[in-house]
Amino acid sequence: MKIALMDSGNGLLAAAAAVHRMRPDADLVLSSDPASMPWGPRTPEDVVERALACARAAAERRPDALIVACNTASVHALDAIRAELEPGLPVIGTVPAIKPAAAAGGPVAVWATPVTTGSPYQRGLIRDFASGVDVTEVPCPGLADAVQRADSDAVDLAVEAAAAATPRGVRSVVLGCTHYELVAERIRAAVQDPAAPPLTLYGSAEAVAAQALRRIGAAPAPDAEPSGGLTVLFAGQEAELEPASLFYPEGRSLVTPSPARF
């Protein structure tokens, strides 16, 4: 079994780690183009072109499914990727987890890139799935780039700024960019009101990993032999995970052998 994931940069690590936890015997292909980041400010046409290039590079490795582990790419390029690769290759997009967050009750904060915040796409999700729920959209300028570089000080500054724009007393925060899942606990610590119930964070990694397995008819098998291989592609060329990716537990989990089972 082989699962491919694509993103502009290391935002795909959270979903890749989720796939690895569910199926440690699966081969993984990580296709990204970190030199072209950030994708958010680019034109939709440019995002489509770059996302298609990453998707094509991944498809050349003949995976069983492709996860578009990027909110920006899913917004602008998912239809184009599916039109080119399906039905031969199942393609799974990433949608901010507004629906489950709203179902749990508000108030809810949606952290996203400045371009996504207030976009027709995100407003549509709020309209369709969070009607009657108190939802605040919070732009997070610079956070995805700081996560990509594993710049701890820049991450803290961006998180603090977004936390200051988040209303006190929110019950949940939707992580509307896959990069944010890599610093989820830092977000929790910045937003959590000591006087309020524990904050719930809603990411997409577990859901898209599970959906990818469903699409290919595979069940989770977390106790399977950890025999899966890892292929890393930058702009279509084989590479190694960047040091910044190994800063995160999700990245390290992909290259660290699992403990032997007895």
Image: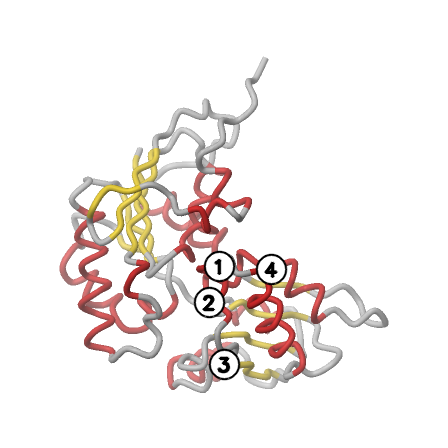
How far across and how far down the image is residue 119, in percent? 40, 85
Q: Which of marks 2 and 1 is nearer the N terminus?
A: 2
Q: Mark 3 points at which residue?
A: 126
Q: Which of marks 3 and 4 is nearer the N terminus?
A: 3
Q: Which of marks 4 and 1 is nearer the N terminus?
A: 4
Q: In which quarter of the image is the C terminus?
A: top right
Query: What's the residue type where badge 2 is placed?
Result: Ala
Q: Label 3 vs label 2: CA separation?
A: 22 Å
Does 205 appear above or below 133?
above
Q: In which quarter of the image is the N terminus?
A: top left
Query: What's the residue type where badge 4 is placed?
Result: Ala
Q: Mark 4 points at which residue?
A: 184
Q: Name the residue under label 1.
A: 204
Q: How many other residues sit within 10 Å of disc 3, few (<14), some (14-19) or many (≥20)?
A: many
**In the image, which is nearer the foreground, mark 1 or mark 3?**
1
Q: How many other residues sit within 10 Å of disc 2, few (<14), some (14-19) or many (≥20)?
A: many
Residue sitting nearer the eye, 247 or 65: 247
Q: Label 3 vs label 4: CA separation?
A: 22 Å
**In the image, which is nearer the foreground, mark 2 or mark 1?**
2
**In the image, which is nearer the foreground, mark 2 or mark 4?**
2
**In the image, which is nearer the foreground, mark 4 or mark 1?**
4
Residue sitting nearer the eye, 105 or 201: 201
Q: Earlier in the sequence, mark 1 or mark 3?
A: 3
